[in-house]
Image (cartoon, coloured by chain):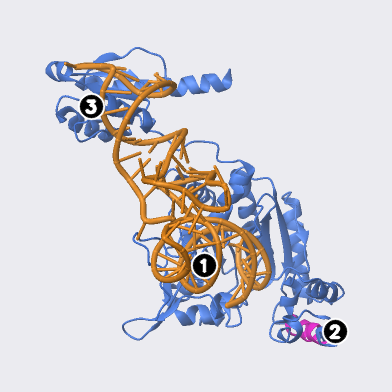
Amino acid sequence: MAKGGDDRATPRAPTGTRDVLWPESWRFEDAVARFRALVEGAGYGLIQSPVFEYASVFRRGIGEENDVVGKEMYEFEDRDGQMLALRPEGTASVVRAYVQHRPVLPWKAWYMAPLLRHERPQAARYRQHHQLGIEALGVADADLDVEVIWVAHTFFGRLGLTDFSLRIGSMGDATCRPAYLELLTAYLDAHRGELCDEHRERFRTNPMRVFDCKRPECRAVTAAAPKLVDHLCDACAAHFARVREGLASLGIVFDVDPRLVRGFDYYTRTTFEFASGAIEAAQNALCGGGRYDGLVEMLGGEPTPGVGFGMGIERLLVACDAEGTFPADPPALDAFVVDVAGGDAARAITVRLRDAGLRADRAFDGRSMKAQMKLADRSGATVALIVGPAEAASGTVLLRPLRSEGDQLPVTLDAVVDAVHDAVVDAVHEVVGEVGG
RNA sequence: GUGGGCGUAGCUCAGUUGGUUAGAGCGCCAGGUUGUGGCCCUGGAGGUCGGGGGUUCAAGUCCCCUCGCUCACCCCA
C-alpha cells in the first residue's frame, strides 16, 4: 500500500513542489525575459524539448553512478511498456535533440525547463525546479568556454547581484584523466583508513567524489592528494590556461579550485560553478556547468565537443531576495472600468481599451460603486473610468485619476483611449520627475 | 535514505498548572456616504485546533501512532 500523503480534505501540491502565485510569479517571468534578451543577443536560439525522455538518454548521458540518475530520477514504464524518465537535468535532452536533428554546427541553444528529481526538499531545493541554460555544440575553442561563463556572469550582473563567486576547474580528458584517476585511487587507497566511513570503500567507484566530502577526515586526506589540474595533458593544460586568460581579460574574477568536482560524468576539461554568498541556506550554488566533449558520442552521435551551463531559477530568485534586487513592482493596469449602469459600457470600453493596446480590467456582478472603486484601487490602475446612469445616457465616462490628486473629468466614448493614454503618460512623467528631483 | 524543529481562521500568531459557546491583528465582505477608492468607525463571514487512537468528569492543552511542513546531512541548481 502506498504511503498516503493526501489524507486531508483539501488537495495539496505534491511534496517538494509549490505553486507560485502572482505577483511572486512575475519575478520568475521577468528573470526569464532578461535571460532571453541576453542569450538571444549572443546568438543562442531557444530549444523546447520534452519533459520526459526514454530513460536511457539520462542513464547513458549522466551516468548510473550519479545520485540524480541512480537515486532521484522519476522513472516509470508507460502504457506501451517503454521505460521513460522525467527530465532530471537539462544537458542530456539538448544533446539528444542535437543527435536526432543534426543542426548545422556550431549550434548554440538556450532553454528554460522544469527539472524533476525525487530529493528530500529543503531550503532552495525542490523536487521540481526550473533551470535556465545554454548549450553550445561543435566548438572546441576555449574562448567558447569563456563566452559561456561570461553569459552567466553578465546575467547575474544585469539582475543586480553582486555577492557571488566563481570557481573553475578542469576535469581533463580521455588522454590525461584515466592516468590521473589511477594515481588518485592509489593515493586514496594508501590513506584508506583515514577516510570517513562513507568514502572508505566508495572512493573506488568515483575517487574524485572524495574532494567534495565535507568531513574533516576526508578533507585532511584530499588536501595533500594529487590534483587533476597539476596532471593535465599538454592540450588540456593549454585549454585551461586559455580559459583563465580569457576570463581575466574580460575582468571576470574567479578562483581555480582543484577540488571542484561537478556531479555529472559527462564533464571534460572546463568545469565551473557560481555560488551566492547572500543565500543563508546550505544550497547556495546558482549555476553549474562546463565542457562535455564526450557526451554527444555517448548518446550515439559523431564525436562533437560541447559546453554549457544550467542555472536554477528558484535559487536565483532567493539570491535576488537576499540581495534586495527586483525592487520594481510588476506593471500595473492602465485603467479600471467601474460601471453602475448595467454593465454595457464596461463591456464595450474594456474591449476598446485592450484593442488599443492599453491594460484594462473591470468589475463584474453589478457590485456597488464603492465595491467597484475598491477593486479599481487594489488593481493598481492609473485611472478609473466611471459610468453611472448619467454618463450612460450622455455617452460619456468620468475619468478619475487614482494615483494623483487631479480632478475627475468627463470624456466622450470616442476620446477614452486617447484620454487614458495621456493620463498614463502623465503618470510616468510624474514618477520620473520625482526620481529626478 | 538519516537526523532536528514545527503543525490553532486565507496570512502572521495568542491561547496561562487540561476547565463555559477557541481569540487577536492583517486580509476579505457589508454598512457608515441611496454616484466615488485610499484613512477612520461599526458589523459580518471564515476554524473537523493536521488526522487517528488513548488517559480524564473534562483535551487546542497530557500520552502513542500517523500525515504534512520545515531545516540540516547526502546530493545538487
- Check if mark 2's residue and mark 1's residue have beta carbons within 8 Å: no
* Residue range highlighted in magenta: A177-186
Per the rendering, the colour in which chain A appears is: blue
Q: Residue at x 28, y 24 (%)?
A: A370
Q: Earlier in the sequence, mark 2 or mark 3?
A: 2
Using a 10 Å C-alpha cutoff, classify the residue at mark 2 as few (fewer than 14 neighbours), some (14 to 19) or many (20 or more).
Answer: some
Q: Are marks 2 and 1 on the same chain?
A: yes
- Can residue A421 be seen by looking at this rendering? no
- Residue A58 drawn in magenta: no
Calculate the distance from the C-alpha at mark 3 to the C-alpha at mark 1. Answer: 52 Å
Question: What residue does disc 2 label?
Answer: A191
Give the chain coloured orange.
B
| Mark 3 or 1, closer to the camera | 3
- Which quarter of the image is occupied by the N terminus of chain A? bottom left
- Check if mark 2's residue and mark 3's residue have beta carbons within 8 Å: no
Calculate the distance from the C-alpha at mark 2 to the C-alpha at mark 1. Answer: 37 Å
- Which quarter of the image is occupied by the C terminus of chain A? top right
Using a 10 Å C-alpha cutoff, classify the residue at mark 1 as few (fewer than 14 neighbours), some (14 to 19) or many (20 or more).
Answer: many
Q: Earlier in the sequence, mark 2 or mark 1?
A: 1
Question: What residue does disc 1 label?
Answer: A90
Calculate the distance from the C-alpha at mark 2 to the C-alpha at mark 3. Answer: 80 Å
Pick whichever, B38 or A57, lies toward us.
B38
Question: What residue does disc 3 label?
Answer: A368
